Image: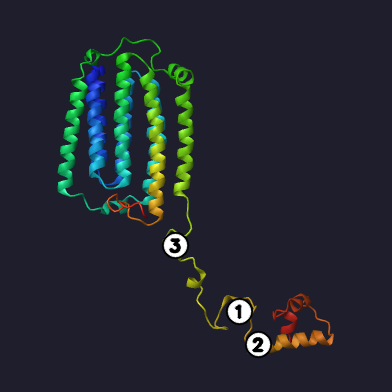
Amino acid sequence: MAELIFFIAAIGAIAGAIGVVALRNPFYSVLALVGHLLSLAALFLLLRAEFIAAAQVVVYAGAVMVLYLFVVSYIGGGSLQQLTPGGAQLRTVAGAAVLALFAELAIAVLGSGLQAIDSDGAPYVSGFGTPAQIGEALLTKFLFPFEVASLLLLVAAVGAVVLARRRKGTTLEDREEDPTRWITPRDLFSGTMAEAVGAVRPPHEAAPGQAATDETERGRPVATPAGDDAEAGRPLPTPGGERP
Amino acid sequence: MSIAWYLVVSALIFCIGAGGVLVRRNPLVILLCLELMLNAANLALIAFARMHGNADGQIFALIVMVVAACEVTVGLGLIVAIFRRRLPIDVDELRELQG
């Protein structure tokens, strides 16, 4: 039974890895990596690393991959597909390098002379790899690496925020925020917003306003509180002023 | 299953990830391939922890996961910064440090 699960999970993990490399769309690459991580969690369970398997599924396949998906969506997966494929020469050299690497790793692993490598591992001890054991080890024997890891996470979070923040003057949009570019000078009385609200009046309509100020100067009572406008010095058309 | 099988699977995944880093030009996919390589190392660590019956290797794998999460965060921040500056998202084009 363990053999069957191992082969299914191993094939899933390797297929997911190949999918990450081979798929053209980065969105599908991320999804292939999620499948790869889930298969790897099954392998971890077979190796009796229960807590690592759970953390792998929750943290990796859950949180980190969602972060990846957000960035892929933000950048736009479609626009990334227009990259020209790498040259055939590059692929040949890369394939040769990878084959050499695999041969080296196989020699290193299988020719290591470890007798236990062909066994099923040490006899199982109850409680091996459980959250209780991992937590006890993290808080006693490995307390310092634990704290350093928390500090590292903090530094990475601050660094990511600093890296991805919006800077002034770095994008094309920021450059066009120069007001002399988008406020075009135009003639007076050609339909500006200032005329629409009555702040500026064309000369041929200025006569009633002038008359109103003349009337207030003469001491005639004005029905509307036009005194505020007169104090502000703006030639606003008050209802009293427009009345004939 | 003997431990050697797990190590062979780990070596295969590591090689696939290394090949992806060499071949692909999209920095997002290169980050994904780095994840593959780190996961292969994790699998080897946990296999050796099982071989020795010692849980210290699992702690090591947890720390590797933390480092991988940090690497992902900083890498994605870099990619977002590149995208904000309207630079091409292609590692062949981004070979100069001077933006």
Q: Nearer the viewer, mark 3 or mark 1?
A: 3
Residue A164 location (% of width, % of height)? 44, 48
- Residue A77 visible in image: yes
Residue located 49% across and 36% down the image: A154
Find residue B77 and report its image quarter.
Answer: top left
Is residue A53 in view?
A: no
Q: Tell me the quarter of the image containing the N terminus of chain A.
A: top left
Quarter in which the C terminus of chain A is drawn: bottom right
- Discs 1, 2: same chain: yes
Which of disc 1 and disc 3 is earlier in sequence? 3
Q: Position of residue A14 (x, y in %)?
A: 24, 31
Give amino acid for label 1: Glu
Q: Chain of mark 1?
A: A
Q: Which mark is residue A195?
A: 1
- At x 46% / y 66%, what residue is drawn? A176
Residue hosting label 2: A205
Confirm whether circles 3 and 1 share one chain. Answer: yes
Cα separation, mark 1 vs mark 2, equals 12 Å
Chain letter of the residue carrying label 2: A
